[in-house]
Amino acid sequence: MPKSLGLLALLLLVGCTSVRSTQKKLNSGDYDAAIEKALKELRPNKTKKSAQDYVLLLHEAFLKDQERDHRALDKVKTILNWYNVNQPINSLTPWTSVKKKSGPSSH
């Protein structure tokens, strides 16, 4: 009986360490690694009670990764909008300098 209790304690410790390392990856912003780690742990143990921790971590990592991706896309959209708005103005600059060189128009 004591051997099985020791084995159980070891398995529990290893399991907690794995959950903790996944949580560390999530907290440090390494969402892709946290997702991969949670998926790796869930593949063989989908129906076990201990899988619930990984499901929650996977869900949280996915949401945070998705939020970060949306922020990055918003930045790209802002840059593209700025470029599209300013492009016509920038393309007129050579004509403005030609008009200044040729003098005032007689119209």
Image (cartoon, helix red, strand yellow):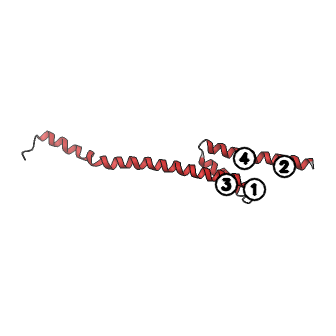
Q: Residues within 10 Å of mark 4 (few under 14, many from 20)?
A: some
- Amino acid type, mark 4: Ser
Q: Is residue 31 left or right of residue 85?
A: right
Whether residues under marks 1 and 2 lie with C-beta atoms below 8 angstroms apart, the answer is: no
> Which residue bears the numbered disc 4?
18
Q: Residues within 10 Å of mark 1 (few under 14, many from 20)?
A: few
The first of marks 2 and 3 along the sequence is 2
Separation (CA) of disc 2 from disc 3:
22 Å
Q: Residue at x 6, y 45 (%)?
A: 106
> Which residue bears the numbered disc 3?
55
Image coordinates of residue 23 in percent, x first then y, are: 66, 45
Separation (CA) of disc 1 from disc 2:
15 Å
Instruction: Kindly state the secondary structure of the residue where label 2 is placed.
Output: helix
The image's mark for residue 49 is: 1
> Which residue bears the numbered disc 2?
8
- Amino acid type, mark 3: Val
- Amino acid type, mark 1: Lys
In this rendered view, identify the residue nearer to me: 36 or 94: 36
The first of marks 4 and 3 along the sequence is 4
Image coordinates of residue 52 in percent, x first then y, are: 71, 54
Q: Residue at x 66, y 52 (%)?
A: 56
In this rendered view, identify the residue nearer to me: 33 or 74: 74
Separation (CA) of disc 1 from disc 4:
15 Å
- Amino acid type, mark 2: Leu
